Amino acid sequence: MIDTLVVYGKWPFRRIEFDWIELLEKMDENGVEKAMLFNVNGAFYRDAHEANLELFEVLKKLPREVERRFIVMGVVNPIYPGWEHDLNFLLESGVRIVVLLPNYHGYSLKDPALSHFWRFISTHDIIVSFVAKFEDPRQRHRLDANDLLENDVIDLLRTYRNLKVILHNFGYSSSLSIYLSNPDHDHLFFDLNFFYEVPTGEPTKFVRIVGKDRVVFSSFYPFRYYKAGIMKLIETGIMDSRDFERKFREALKWDSK
Amino acid sequence: MRLKFIDVHAHLYLMQGKEEEDEWRLKYSERYGIEKLIISVLGSWGKRSPLYFPDPVDFRSGNKRLHEFIRSYQGPLELYGYVTVNQAFLEDSLDELRRGVEKYGFVGLKLLAPFPCNDSSTFKLIEKAVDYDIPILIHTFHGRKSGITGQNPSDSTDVAFLSKNFPRAKIIMAHIGGGGDWEYALKAVRGTKVYVDISGSGCDKGMIEKAVRIVGVDRVLFGTDLNMGVGIAKLLDSNLTHEEKLKIAWNNAMAVFGGALK
Protein backbone atom coordinates (compact mmCIF):
# COMPACT_ATOMS: atom_id res chain seq x y z
CA MET A 1 0.00 0.00 0.00
CA ILE A 2 1.07 3.57 -0.65
CA ASP A 3 0.61 6.30 1.90
CA THR A 4 -0.08 9.38 -0.22
CA LEU A 5 0.31 12.05 2.45
CA VAL A 6 3.07 12.38 5.01
CA VAL A 7 4.07 15.88 6.04
CA TYR A 8 7.59 16.78 7.07
CA GLY A 9 8.49 20.13 8.59
CA LYS A 10 7.42 22.51 11.29
CA TRP A 11 3.73 23.27 11.61
CA PRO A 12 3.57 26.65 13.35
CA PHE A 13 0.18 26.38 15.03
CA ARG A 14 0.46 23.24 17.13
CA ARG A 15 3.29 21.20 18.61
CA ILE A 16 3.62 18.21 16.27
CA GLU A 17 6.60 15.88 16.39
CA PHE A 18 7.88 14.19 13.22
CA ASP A 19 9.72 10.97 14.13
CA TRP A 20 11.25 8.88 11.32
CA ILE A 21 11.55 5.77 13.47
CA GLU A 22 7.95 5.97 14.61
CA LEU A 23 6.78 6.61 11.05
CA LEU A 24 8.63 3.58 9.71
CA GLU A 25 7.19 1.44 12.50
CA LYS A 26 3.69 2.61 11.65
CA MET A 27 4.24 1.96 7.95
CA ASP A 28 5.47 -1.55 8.69
CA GLU A 29 2.68 -2.30 11.15
CA ASN A 30 0.08 -1.29 8.59
CA GLY A 31 1.55 -2.86 5.47
CA VAL A 32 2.60 0.42 3.84
CA GLU A 33 5.49 0.00 1.41
CA LYS A 34 6.07 3.61 0.45
CA ALA A 35 4.99 7.03 1.57
CA MET A 36 4.71 10.26 -0.39
CA LEU A 37 5.89 13.22 1.62
CA PHE A 38 6.47 16.93 1.29
CA ASN A 39 7.88 19.68 3.45
CA VAL A 40 5.16 21.89 4.94
CA ASN A 41 7.71 24.65 5.45
CA GLY A 42 7.08 25.29 1.77
CA ALA A 43 3.71 26.76 2.74
CA PHE A 44 5.44 29.43 4.79
CA TYR A 45 8.84 30.12 3.25
CA ARG A 46 8.70 33.00 0.79
CA ASP A 47 10.72 30.84 -1.60
CA ALA A 48 8.85 27.56 -1.34
CA HIS A 49 11.51 25.66 -3.27
CA GLU A 50 13.91 26.03 -0.34
CA ALA A 51 11.66 23.59 1.49
CA ASN A 52 12.23 21.03 -1.26
CA LEU A 53 15.99 21.45 -1.01
CA GLU A 54 15.74 21.14 2.76
CA LEU A 55 13.81 17.89 2.44
CA PHE A 56 16.33 16.45 -0.06
CA GLU A 57 19.10 17.19 2.43
CA VAL A 58 17.23 15.46 5.24
CA LEU A 59 16.49 12.40 3.12
CA LYS A 60 20.10 12.12 2.00
CA LYS A 61 21.13 11.61 5.63
CA LEU A 62 18.83 8.61 5.99
CA PRO A 63 20.03 5.09 5.26
CA ARG A 64 19.52 4.25 1.59
CA GLU A 65 16.95 1.53 2.29
CA VAL A 66 14.91 4.02 4.34
CA GLU A 67 15.20 6.83 1.81
CA ARG A 68 13.91 4.50 -0.90
CA ARG A 69 10.63 4.13 0.96
CA PHE A 70 9.76 7.79 0.45
CA ILE A 71 8.46 9.51 -2.65
CA VAL A 72 9.14 13.24 -2.56
CA MET A 73 6.38 15.64 -3.50
CA GLY A 74 7.76 19.04 -4.38
CA VAL A 75 6.09 22.23 -3.22
CA VAL A 76 5.71 24.67 -6.10
CA ASN A 77 4.53 28.26 -6.01
CA PRO A 78 3.65 29.13 -9.61
CA ILE A 79 3.45 32.87 -8.97
CA TYR A 80 6.99 33.06 -7.61
CA PRO A 81 9.84 33.91 -9.97
CA GLY A 82 11.79 30.94 -11.21
CA TRP A 83 9.09 28.31 -10.71
CA GLU A 84 9.87 26.77 -14.10
CA HIS A 85 13.56 26.44 -13.23
CA ASP A 86 12.67 24.90 -9.87
CA LEU A 87 10.15 22.55 -11.45
CA ASN A 88 12.74 21.39 -13.97
CA PHE A 89 15.12 20.79 -11.08
CA LEU A 90 12.47 18.67 -9.38
CA LEU A 91 11.88 16.69 -12.57
CA GLU A 92 15.61 16.09 -12.98
CA SER A 93 15.67 14.91 -9.36
CA GLY A 94 12.98 12.34 -10.12
CA VAL A 95 10.09 14.20 -8.52
CA ARG A 96 6.87 13.71 -10.46
CA ILE A 97 4.31 14.90 -7.94
CA VAL A 98 3.93 18.52 -6.90
CA VAL A 99 1.96 19.98 -4.03
CA LEU A 100 0.16 23.22 -4.77
CA LEU A 101 -0.95 25.43 -1.89
CA PRO A 102 -2.78 28.37 -3.47
CA ASN A 103 -4.50 29.26 -0.21
CA TYR A 104 -1.08 29.68 1.44
CA HIS A 105 0.77 31.23 -1.49
CA GLY A 106 -1.99 33.67 -2.31
CA TYR A 107 -3.21 32.98 -5.83
CA SER A 108 -6.35 31.72 -7.50
CA LEU A 109 -6.40 28.55 -9.58
CA LYS A 110 -8.51 30.57 -12.02
CA ASP A 111 -5.75 33.11 -12.61
CA PRO A 112 -5.24 33.24 -16.42
CA ALA A 113 -1.57 34.02 -15.85
CA LEU A 114 -1.14 30.40 -14.77
CA SER A 115 -2.05 28.91 -18.15
CA HIS A 116 1.60 28.36 -19.03
CA PHE A 117 2.11 26.58 -15.71
CA TRP A 118 -0.84 24.24 -16.30
CA ARG A 119 0.40 23.42 -19.80
CA PHE A 120 3.82 22.62 -18.36
CA ILE A 121 2.23 20.32 -15.76
CA SER A 122 0.13 18.56 -18.39
CA THR A 123 2.84 18.08 -20.95
CA HIS A 124 5.31 16.73 -18.40
CA ASP A 125 2.79 14.25 -16.97
CA ILE A 126 3.17 15.67 -13.47
CA ILE A 127 0.71 14.65 -10.78
CA VAL A 128 -0.72 17.53 -8.76
CA SER A 129 -1.65 17.23 -5.10
CA PHE A 130 -3.93 19.81 -3.54
CA VAL A 131 -4.07 19.90 0.25
CA ALA A 132 -7.31 21.68 1.10
CA LYS A 133 -6.45 22.26 4.74
CA PHE A 134 -4.16 21.04 7.48
CA GLU A 135 -6.50 21.43 10.42
CA ASP A 136 -10.21 21.25 11.09
CA PRO A 137 -11.56 24.77 10.49
CA ARG A 138 -13.15 24.66 13.94
CA GLN A 139 -9.72 24.67 15.57
CA ARG A 140 -7.95 26.82 13.03
CA HIS A 141 -5.46 29.38 14.30
CA ARG A 142 -6.35 32.93 13.32
CA LEU A 143 -3.14 33.24 11.30
CA ASP A 144 -3.74 30.03 9.33
CA ALA A 145 -5.13 30.08 5.79
CA ASN A 146 -8.71 29.20 4.87
CA ASP A 147 -9.66 26.03 2.99
CA LEU A 148 -8.92 25.69 -0.68
CA LEU A 149 -12.29 26.17 -2.35
CA GLU A 150 -13.86 23.28 -4.21
CA ASN A 151 -15.22 25.51 -6.98
CA ASP A 152 -11.71 26.59 -7.94
CA VAL A 153 -10.71 22.95 -8.33
CA ILE A 154 -13.89 22.12 -10.25
CA ASP A 155 -13.23 24.86 -12.78
CA LEU A 156 -9.59 23.86 -13.14
CA LEU A 157 -10.48 20.23 -13.84
CA ARG A 158 -13.02 21.29 -16.44
CA THR A 159 -10.43 23.37 -18.21
CA TYR A 160 -7.52 20.91 -18.01
CA ARG A 161 -9.14 17.54 -18.44
CA ASN A 162 -5.94 15.54 -18.62
CA LEU A 163 -4.50 16.75 -15.31
CA LYS A 164 -3.66 14.01 -12.83
CA VAL A 165 -4.86 15.19 -9.45
CA ILE A 166 -4.91 13.91 -5.87
CA LEU A 167 -7.26 15.78 -3.56
CA HIS A 168 -6.12 15.63 0.03
CA ASN A 169 -8.10 16.68 3.09
CA PHE A 170 -11.13 18.04 1.23
CA GLY A 171 -13.69 16.18 3.32
CA TYR A 172 -16.86 14.53 2.12
CA SER A 173 -19.05 17.26 0.68
CA SER A 174 -16.27 19.06 -1.22
CA SER A 175 -14.86 15.80 -2.56
CA LEU A 176 -18.27 14.67 -3.70
CA SER A 177 -19.01 18.00 -5.41
CA ILE A 178 -15.69 17.88 -7.24
CA TYR A 179 -16.27 14.31 -8.35
CA LEU A 180 -19.86 14.91 -9.47
CA SER A 181 -18.75 17.93 -11.48
CA ASN A 182 -16.09 15.86 -13.21
CA PRO A 183 -17.24 12.22 -13.05
CA ASP A 184 -15.45 11.28 -16.27
CA HIS A 185 -12.12 12.78 -15.30
CA ASP A 186 -9.74 9.86 -15.70
CA HIS A 187 -7.13 10.65 -13.09
CA LEU A 188 -8.86 12.12 -10.10
CA PHE A 189 -8.11 10.63 -6.68
CA PHE A 190 -9.41 11.36 -3.20
CA ASP A 191 -8.33 10.55 0.31
CA LEU A 192 -10.80 10.09 3.19
CA ASN A 193 -9.34 12.52 5.70
CA PHE A 194 -11.96 14.82 7.25
CA PHE A 195 -14.70 12.31 6.39
CA TYR A 196 -16.99 11.64 9.34
CA GLU A 197 -19.14 8.95 10.90
CA VAL A 198 -17.68 5.58 10.24
CA PRO A 199 -18.49 2.81 9.50
CA THR A 200 -21.86 3.74 7.99
CA GLY A 201 -21.32 7.39 7.24
CA GLU A 202 -19.44 9.49 4.75
CA PRO A 203 -16.52 7.21 3.74
CA THR A 204 -18.80 4.32 2.87
CA LYS A 205 -21.27 6.53 0.99
CA PHE A 206 -18.41 8.14 -0.92
CA VAL A 207 -16.82 4.87 -1.97
CA ARG A 208 -20.21 3.60 -3.15
CA ILE A 209 -20.59 6.68 -5.37
CA VAL A 210 -17.10 7.21 -6.77
CA GLY A 211 -15.85 3.63 -6.78
CA LYS A 212 -12.92 1.97 -5.07
CA ASP A 213 -10.33 2.87 -7.68
CA ARG A 214 -10.56 6.60 -7.00
CA VAL A 215 -9.77 6.40 -3.31
CA VAL A 216 -6.21 6.55 -1.96
CA PHE A 217 -4.86 6.06 1.51
CA SER A 218 -3.27 8.93 3.35
CA SER A 219 -2.20 8.79 6.97
CA PHE A 220 -1.56 12.55 7.14
CA TYR A 221 1.24 11.69 9.59
CA PRO A 222 2.22 13.34 11.91
CA PHE A 223 -0.85 15.54 12.05
CA ARG A 224 -3.03 12.52 12.76
CA TYR A 225 -2.81 9.15 14.47
CA TYR A 226 -1.59 6.79 11.75
CA LYS A 227 -4.13 4.04 12.24
CA ALA A 228 -7.16 6.32 11.95
CA GLY A 229 -6.91 6.43 8.16
CA ILE A 230 -6.32 2.69 8.00
CA MET A 231 -9.48 2.04 10.01
CA LYS A 232 -11.53 4.04 7.52
CA LEU A 233 -10.24 1.87 4.69
CA ILE A 234 -11.07 -1.27 6.61
CA GLU A 235 -14.54 -0.07 7.47
CA THR A 236 -15.39 0.93 3.93
CA GLY A 237 -14.36 -2.54 2.82
CA ILE A 238 -11.86 -1.37 0.22
CA MET A 239 -8.68 -2.46 1.94
CA ASP A 240 -8.62 -5.86 0.25
CA SER A 241 -10.11 -4.76 -3.02
CA ARG A 242 -8.04 -5.33 -6.14
CA ASP A 243 -9.41 -2.07 -7.51
CA PHE A 244 -8.01 -0.10 -4.62
CA GLU A 245 -4.83 1.74 -5.72
CA ARG A 246 -4.74 0.05 -9.14
CA LYS A 247 -5.57 3.18 -11.07
CA PHE A 248 -3.43 5.32 -8.81
CA ARG A 249 -0.40 3.07 -9.25
CA GLU A 250 -0.91 3.32 -12.99
CA ALA A 251 -1.07 7.11 -12.76
CA LEU A 252 2.11 7.08 -10.75
CA LYS A 253 3.65 4.53 -13.11
CA TRP A 254 4.50 2.81 -9.86
CA ASP A 255 4.86 -0.69 -11.25
CA SER A 256 7.33 0.37 -13.91
CA LYS A 257 9.67 2.03 -11.42
CA MET B 1 -4.55 -7.87 30.13
CA ARG B 2 -5.93 -7.27 26.65
CA LEU B 3 -7.67 -4.00 25.95
CA LYS B 4 -11.43 -4.00 26.03
CA PHE B 5 -13.58 -0.91 25.80
CA ILE B 6 -16.51 0.86 27.35
CA ASP B 7 -17.98 3.44 24.98
CA VAL B 8 -19.27 6.24 27.20
CA HIS B 9 -20.49 8.25 24.22
CA ALA B 10 -22.49 5.88 22.02
CA HIS B 11 -25.56 6.67 19.96
CA LEU B 12 -28.27 4.68 18.24
CA TYR B 13 -31.03 6.01 16.02
CA LEU B 14 -33.73 3.41 16.79
CA MET B 15 -35.95 4.80 14.09
CA GLN B 16 -37.40 3.64 10.80
CA GLY B 17 -34.96 3.68 7.93
CA LYS B 18 -31.90 3.65 10.19
CA GLU B 19 -31.98 -0.02 11.18
CA GLU B 20 -28.99 -0.90 9.03
CA GLU B 21 -26.84 1.86 10.58
CA ASP B 22 -27.73 0.80 14.10
CA GLU B 23 -26.96 -2.80 13.21
CA TRP B 24 -23.55 -1.78 11.86
CA ARG B 25 -22.73 0.18 14.98
CA LEU B 26 -23.44 -2.77 17.20
CA LYS B 27 -21.63 -5.16 14.85
CA TYR B 28 -18.50 -3.00 14.71
CA SER B 29 -18.58 -2.38 18.46
CA GLU B 30 -18.46 -6.12 18.98
CA ARG B 31 -15.72 -6.52 16.36
CA TYR B 32 -13.50 -3.91 18.03
CA GLY B 33 -13.89 -5.22 21.55
CA ILE B 34 -16.28 -2.54 22.80
CA GLU B 35 -18.13 -4.62 25.35
CA LYS B 36 -20.28 -2.02 27.06
CA LEU B 37 -22.03 0.92 25.38
CA ILE B 38 -23.66 3.79 27.20
CA ILE B 39 -26.10 5.07 24.65
CA SER B 40 -28.18 8.16 24.11
CA VAL B 41 -30.94 8.57 21.56
CA LEU B 42 -31.48 12.19 20.62
CA GLY B 43 -35.24 12.05 20.18
CA SER B 44 -36.21 11.81 16.52
CA TRP B 45 -32.77 13.12 15.48
CA GLY B 46 -34.19 16.39 14.28
CA LYS B 47 -37.23 15.10 12.45
CA ARG B 48 -39.91 16.27 14.89
CA SER B 49 -38.09 19.13 16.62
CA PRO B 50 -34.55 20.52 16.32
CA LEU B 51 -31.79 17.99 17.01
CA TYR B 52 -30.20 19.94 19.84
CA PHE B 53 -33.50 21.45 21.03
CA PRO B 54 -35.94 18.54 21.13
CA ASP B 55 -39.36 19.15 22.60
CA PRO B 56 -40.49 16.99 25.53
CA VAL B 57 -42.50 14.62 23.34
CA ASP B 58 -39.41 14.12 21.22
CA PHE B 59 -36.89 13.41 23.98
CA ARG B 60 -39.36 11.23 25.89
CA SER B 61 -39.90 9.18 22.75
CA GLY B 62 -36.19 8.69 22.21
CA ASN B 63 -35.62 7.56 25.80
CA LYS B 64 -38.58 5.17 25.62
CA ARG B 65 -37.32 3.61 22.39
CA LEU B 66 -33.91 3.16 23.97
CA HIS B 67 -35.41 1.55 27.05
CA GLU B 68 -37.44 -0.88 24.93
CA PHE B 69 -34.46 -1.68 22.74
CA ILE B 70 -32.15 -2.40 25.67
CA ARG B 71 -34.81 -4.56 27.32
CA SER B 72 -35.33 -6.66 24.21
CA TYR B 73 -31.67 -6.83 23.08
CA GLN B 74 -30.34 -10.39 23.00
CA GLY B 75 -26.85 -9.79 21.58
CA PRO B 76 -23.41 -10.13 23.15
CA LEU B 77 -22.94 -6.46 24.14
CA GLU B 78 -23.94 -4.83 27.39
CA LEU B 79 -26.11 -1.82 26.64
CA TYR B 80 -26.89 1.01 29.04
CA GLY B 81 -28.77 4.27 28.61
CA TYR B 82 -28.41 7.97 29.24
CA VAL B 83 -31.57 9.93 29.96
CA THR B 84 -31.55 12.57 27.24
CA VAL B 85 -33.30 15.82 28.16
CA ASN B 86 -33.62 19.40 26.98
CA GLN B 87 -33.07 21.59 30.01
CA ALA B 88 -35.05 24.40 28.39
CA PHE B 89 -38.11 22.36 29.43
CA LEU B 90 -37.02 22.02 33.03
CA GLU B 91 -40.08 20.43 34.65
CA ASP B 92 -40.44 17.94 31.78
CA SER B 93 -36.72 17.20 31.99
CA LEU B 94 -36.83 16.59 35.73
CA ASP B 95 -39.82 14.33 35.26
CA GLU B 96 -38.02 12.47 32.47
CA LEU B 97 -34.85 12.14 34.53
CA ARG B 98 -36.85 10.51 37.31
CA ARG B 99 -38.54 8.18 34.82
CA GLY B 100 -35.27 7.36 33.09
CA VAL B 101 -33.39 6.45 36.25
CA GLU B 102 -36.15 4.92 38.35
CA LYS B 103 -38.23 3.17 35.71
CA TYR B 104 -35.84 2.58 32.79
CA GLY B 105 -32.74 1.94 34.87
CA PHE B 106 -30.61 4.38 32.86
CA VAL B 107 -27.18 5.13 34.27
CA GLY B 108 -26.44 8.71 33.22
CA LEU B 109 -27.89 12.07 32.20
CA LYS B 110 -27.27 13.53 28.73
CA LEU B 111 -27.60 17.30 28.42
CA LEU B 112 -28.19 18.77 24.98
CA ALA B 113 -27.55 22.28 23.79
CA PRO B 114 -30.48 24.68 24.16
CA PHE B 115 -28.11 26.98 26.05
CA PRO B 116 -24.78 26.59 27.84
CA CYS B 117 -24.76 24.42 30.94
CA ASN B 118 -23.78 27.26 33.27
CA ASP B 119 -27.29 28.68 32.91
CA SER B 120 -28.99 28.55 36.31
CA SER B 121 -31.94 26.63 34.91
CA THR B 122 -29.63 23.63 34.52
CA PHE B 123 -28.76 23.55 38.22
CA LYS B 124 -31.81 21.61 39.39
CA LEU B 125 -31.02 18.85 36.94
CA ILE B 126 -27.44 18.73 38.13
CA GLU B 127 -28.58 18.54 41.76
CA LYS B 128 -30.91 15.69 40.90
CA ALA B 129 -28.16 13.83 39.03
CA VAL B 130 -25.92 14.25 42.09
CA ASP B 131 -28.71 12.80 44.25
CA TYR B 132 -28.92 9.81 41.91
CA ASP B 133 -25.09 9.66 41.78
CA ILE B 134 -25.09 9.38 37.99
CA PRO B 135 -22.63 10.95 35.54
CA ILE B 136 -23.75 13.86 33.35
CA LEU B 137 -22.59 13.84 29.73
CA ILE B 138 -22.62 17.41 28.44
CA HIS B 139 -22.65 18.11 24.71
CA THR B 140 -19.73 20.52 24.45
CA PHE B 141 -18.36 22.47 21.55
CA HIS B 142 -14.69 23.38 21.56
CA GLY B 143 -14.56 25.98 18.84
CA ARG B 144 -15.98 29.36 18.04
CA LYS B 145 -19.62 29.07 19.03
CA SER B 146 -21.10 31.84 16.97
CA GLY B 147 -23.05 30.74 13.98
CA ILE B 148 -23.79 27.12 14.92
CA THR B 149 -27.22 26.59 13.47
CA GLY B 150 -29.82 25.18 15.83
CA GLN B 151 -27.74 24.90 18.97
CA ASN B 152 -26.15 26.99 21.68
CA PRO B 153 -23.79 24.48 23.21
CA SER B 154 -21.63 24.65 26.27
CA ASP B 155 -17.96 25.28 25.84
CA SER B 156 -15.22 24.05 28.14
CA THR B 157 -15.26 27.14 30.34
CA ASP B 158 -19.00 26.65 30.95
CA VAL B 159 -18.34 23.04 31.91
CA ALA B 160 -15.51 24.06 34.22
CA PHE B 161 -17.79 26.63 35.88
CA LEU B 162 -20.44 24.00 36.50
CA SER B 163 -17.93 21.57 37.99
CA LYS B 164 -16.51 24.18 40.34
CA ASN B 165 -20.00 25.01 41.59
CA PHE B 166 -21.13 21.39 41.85
CA PRO B 167 -18.02 19.56 43.05
CA ARG B 168 -19.96 16.35 43.71
CA ALA B 169 -21.28 16.19 40.14
CA LYS B 170 -19.68 13.59 37.88
CA ILE B 171 -19.44 15.71 34.75
CA ILE B 172 -18.22 14.32 31.45
CA MET B 173 -17.21 16.95 28.89
CA ALA B 174 -18.13 15.43 25.55
CA HIS B 175 -15.96 14.73 22.56
CA ILE B 176 -12.61 16.47 22.71
CA GLY B 177 -12.27 15.03 19.19
CA GLY B 178 -15.53 16.62 18.14
CA GLY B 179 -13.98 19.56 16.38
CA GLY B 180 -12.58 22.74 17.80
CA ASP B 181 -9.64 23.79 19.90
CA TRP B 182 -9.31 20.71 22.08
CA GLU B 183 -6.09 22.07 23.59
CA TYR B 184 -8.02 25.09 24.89
CA ALA B 185 -10.76 22.79 26.18
CA LEU B 186 -8.31 20.67 28.15
CA LYS B 187 -6.63 23.71 29.69
CA ALA B 188 -10.04 25.13 30.65
CA VAL B 189 -11.03 22.12 32.76
CA ARG B 190 -7.60 21.47 34.29
CA GLY B 191 -7.84 21.36 38.06
CA THR B 192 -11.58 20.67 38.08
CA LYS B 193 -13.31 17.32 38.59
CA VAL B 194 -14.43 17.16 34.97
CA TYR B 195 -13.92 13.96 33.00
CA VAL B 196 -13.27 14.26 29.27
CA ASP B 197 -14.31 11.77 26.62
CA ILE B 198 -12.08 11.29 23.58
CA SER B 199 -14.89 10.74 21.09
CA GLY B 200 -15.40 12.50 17.78
CA SER B 201 -13.85 12.28 14.36
CA GLY B 202 -10.88 14.42 15.35
CA CYS B 203 -7.76 12.31 15.64
CA ASP B 204 -4.97 14.87 15.90
CA LYS B 205 -1.81 13.04 16.90
CA GLY B 206 -0.95 13.94 20.47
CA MET B 207 -4.54 14.61 21.54
CA ILE B 208 -4.81 11.65 23.89
CA GLU B 209 -1.33 12.14 25.36
CA LYS B 210 -2.06 15.81 26.04
CA ALA B 211 -5.40 14.97 27.63
CA VAL B 212 -3.58 12.65 30.01
CA ARG B 213 -0.92 15.28 30.69
CA ILE B 214 -3.39 18.10 31.37
CA VAL B 215 -6.36 16.51 33.17
CA GLY B 216 -4.72 13.29 34.38
CA VAL B 217 -5.12 9.73 33.15
CA ASP B 218 -7.91 8.99 35.65
CA ARG B 219 -10.18 11.59 34.06
CA VAL B 220 -9.97 10.51 30.43
CA LEU B 221 -12.72 8.23 29.11
CA PHE B 222 -13.02 6.26 25.89
CA GLY B 223 -15.95 7.17 23.65
CA THR B 224 -16.78 7.13 19.96
CA ASP B 225 -19.75 9.39 19.15
CA LEU B 226 -20.35 7.46 15.91
CA ASN B 227 -16.64 7.18 15.02
CA MET B 228 -15.71 3.74 16.24
CA GLY B 229 -12.67 2.82 14.19
CA VAL B 230 -11.16 6.27 14.57
CA GLY B 231 -11.82 6.18 18.31
CA ILE B 232 -10.10 2.86 18.70
CA ALA B 233 -7.24 3.97 16.43
CA LYS B 234 -6.37 7.11 18.35
CA LEU B 235 -6.21 5.33 21.66
CA LEU B 236 -4.22 2.38 20.31
CA ASP B 237 -1.78 4.63 18.44
CA SER B 238 -1.19 7.00 21.33
CA ASN B 239 2.15 6.95 23.11
CA LEU B 240 0.77 5.78 26.44
CA THR B 241 1.54 2.72 28.50
CA HIS B 242 -0.74 -0.29 28.31
CA GLU B 243 -1.92 0.44 31.84
CA GLU B 244 -2.84 4.00 30.89
CA LYS B 245 -4.74 2.80 27.83
CA LEU B 246 -6.56 0.25 29.96
CA LYS B 247 -7.65 2.97 32.35
CA ILE B 248 -9.02 5.09 29.53
CA ALA B 249 -10.60 2.18 27.68
CA TRP B 250 -12.23 0.53 30.66
CA ASN B 251 -11.26 1.18 34.28
CA ASN B 252 -12.12 4.87 34.46
CA ALA B 253 -15.62 4.30 33.11
CA MET B 254 -16.17 1.50 35.59
CA ALA B 255 -15.13 3.88 38.35
CA VAL B 256 -17.19 6.89 37.28
CA PHE B 257 -20.35 4.89 36.61
CA GLY B 258 -19.85 3.09 39.90
CA GLY B 259 -21.88 -0.05 40.41
CA ALA B 260 -24.28 0.80 37.60
CA LEU B 261 -22.18 -1.16 35.09
CA LYS B 262 -22.01 -4.91 35.67
Image (spheres, coloured by chain):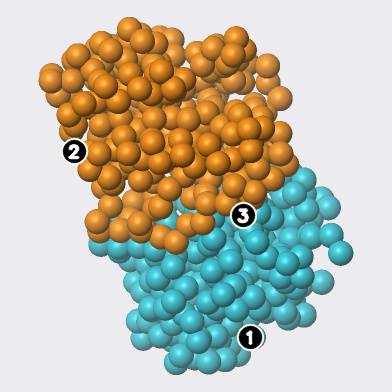
Chain colours: A orange, B cyan
Res. A145 visible in picture: yes
Name the residue carrying label 3: B234
The residue beneath circle 2 is A106
User: In which image quadrant can residue A64 be found?
Assistant: top right
In the rendered view, would you say B116 is above or below A35?
below
Badge 2 sits on which subunit? A
Horizontal side, residue B180 vs residue B172: left or right: left
User: What subunit carries mark 1?
Assistant: B
Q: Could you tell which of marks 1 and 3 lies nearer the N-terminus? A: 1
Q: Mark 1 is on which residue type? A: Tyr
Residue underneath mark 1: B132
- Classify mark 3: residues with Cα within 10 Å, few (<14), some (14-19) or many (20+): many
Marks counted in the figure total: 3
Q: Secondary structure at mark 1?
A: helix
Q: Is residue A25 above or below residue B223?
A: above
Residue at image x 77%, y 80%? B259
Seen from the viewer's position, the closer of residues A122 and A69 is A69
Report the mark closest to the observer, 2 or 1: 2
